[in-house]
Structures are given as structure tokens and as C-alpha cells.
Image (tube, helix red, strand yellow):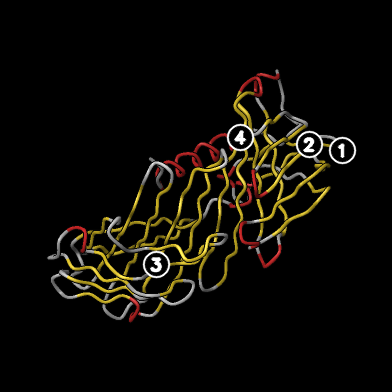
Amino acid sequence: MLGRKRLGLALAAFVIACGAQAAPAAAEGEAETGAFGSFRLKGTNGYSVLAIALSKPRFKHGEILVFVGKGSASGLDSVIYLAPAAVTPDTIEADLGPVGQISLQFESSGPPERVHASCKRGGSVTYEPGVWVGEIEFVGEEGFTQVHRTRTKAIPNPFLETGCGGIRIGETSGQEADAARLIARSATRKHAIYLQANKNHRKARVRVEASLEERRDGMVVSREVVRSFPASTFSFDAELRSATLAPPAPFSGSASLHRDAQPANQWTGNLSVDFSGRADVPLAGRRFNSALGHWKRTEVLLR
């Protein structure tokens, strides 16, 4: 069964692996150390594309992660493609099925350099500057973005660029009587849909996130939408026996939770969302399990 946890573990593995390796053609030691390469491009319609490719020792079990995202003051739209790839210190070969193809050769442009993170705790990495030359063809489903390039700069470990800060997100239960969290999920062997809405008090803005994860064409594809909406978007009674969620675009329609109804009828409505590359995905109905509780969402800025 697919789910948010599985792709989260895959991403964590990429972070750990990338944190331990240099850019391609800069690996020190034997070939058994594997390989790593990364590049960043601009797509159409305001999207950015970050590709990270790596292989395990002896260049086996290579993978490529392509993160396509667009952020704004209103929220985030993103798609992650995780696919098999052939990765050596000097080449990246990946078939992204109907959305594209990557076939690249590394060309060095100078001696190895050392790059440091933006803070002392972030560490550093030695890499060989250069460019990737070949073919990068990517056309997102439903044409949400496109990239066509034959040459792009190789970048060192992209996680160094994030620095040492960030935001730690958590949730606390039972401490706020007027706070609520609604969750609805549906999962099969081939796909998983997840919806979550948080409201910390009656007049607070509502944070809504929805994700769709699929396994198809030999890849794992995960789409996500995150938005913040006015308080009226999410309403519920004091006992949390019922609730209604009706967010605006990219969502449409509404859904209602009735905890006293039969399980198949507890989460009903015509609520749907338009993901990047996959429009009009239902977020309510008989196949969904739902939960409603007193949870408060917290954010702590890390320095």
C-alpha cells in the first residue's frame, strides 16, 4: 500500500545519501562509493525543477528524484517523481515514462572546489564544477509545466543551500477546545489520497493540505497542494460531532462529516481538488476514512 509515510522515508533516504556525497565526477576513493548528481532548472508556468540522482555502491540501484514545485504567498503546489535511473560519476540516464527522458554526460569546468552551508552547523562538501550535457525533456501531465534543455549547470549538494534553519511543525491534542483537525484518507495498492484541515481557534485561518500518491509507469508520483484560507472555510460544532469543509480554488465543492452516521456515510460531499498534472480529484465519499479531533497545529522557527 502506498502512503505519505513511504514517500517520506524515500525522501529521507535521499537527504541522508546526499548529505554524505559530493557532486558527480568528484567522488574520492573507489568506484564502490557510488555516485551523485544534481541540477536545477526553470519550467514554464512559474514552476521550478530540482533533479537529484544517486546510486548505491558499485553504481547499482540508481534512482532519480525530480521535484517540481511552485510556491507563492497563498501556498504551495508540487509534484515529486521518484524513478529508477542509471547513475555514474559522469552520466545520468532515466526514463520518466510519459512525462519525459533524461540522458546526460558530465563535463568538468575546473578543479574541485569546496562549498559551505550558510551556517556553521551545516558542514561543507567538495565538488567538481561543471555542466550536464545531453537531453532533458520533461512535459508535466496536462501540460502544467515543461522543460526542454540540452545543457545545464551541475550543482553541489542542494541541501546545503537550505541552511540550518527551517520550521518544525507539530500538533498538540486536547489543549484547545475550539481547535480542530479534520483528516480524510483513501488508500489502495496503487494510490493514496490524503486530506487534512487545521483550525487553531474559531477565528483562525484554516490550513488545508491534500496529497495524491500513485505508483505507475515504474515510478512513484506524489502531488501536493497546501493552502491557507479564511476561518469560514472550516466549521464544526463544539462536541465535534459534525463539520463542514468548503475551501476555494484550487479546491471546489464541499464535504461534511457526521460522526453519528453509518461509517460509509460519515464523510460525504462533492469536494475535489486540482493538483498539478491531475485535475478534479475527489476528496470525499464512501471510500474515505475520516477523523475529527481537538488538535492544535504548532510551528517553531529553527535557527
Which numbered marker is on residue 128?
Answer: 2
Disc 4 marks a residue whose amino acid type is Pro
Mark 4 element type = strand
Disc 1 marks a residue whose amino acid type is Gly
Whichever of labels 1 and 2 marks the residue nearer the N terminus, that label is: 1
Which numbered marker is on residue 208?
Answer: 3
Residue at x-position 35% and y-position 48%? 187
In the rendered structure, the answer to whether residue 98 lies left or right of residue 271 reads right
In the rendered structure, the answer to whether residue 95 lies left or right of residue 10 reads right
Mark 1 element type = loop
Disc 2 marks a residue whose amino acid type is Glu
Whichever of labels 4 and 2 marks the residue nearer the N terminus, that label is: 4
Whichever of labels 2 and 3 marks the residue nearer the N terminus, that label is: 2
Decide: is 39 above or below 229.
above
Residue at x-position 57% and y-position 34%? 17
Q: Quadrant of residue 210?
A: bottom left
State how far apart marks 1 and 2 are (Cα).
7 Å
State how far apart marks 4 and 2 are (Cα).
24 Å
Q: Which residue matches tag 4?
A: 84
Residue 127, given in percent of the width and then of the height, sits at 74, 36
Q: Are marks 4 and 3 in contact (CB under 8 Å)?
A: no
Q: Are marks 1 and 2 in contact (CB under 8 Å)?
A: yes
- How packed is label 3: few (under 14 Cα within 10 Å), some, or many (20 or more)? many
**Count of marks, rendered view:** 4
- How packed is label 1: few (under 14 Cα within 10 Å), some, or many (20 or more)? few
Q: Which residue matches tag 1?
A: 110
Decide: is 178 above or below 106.
below
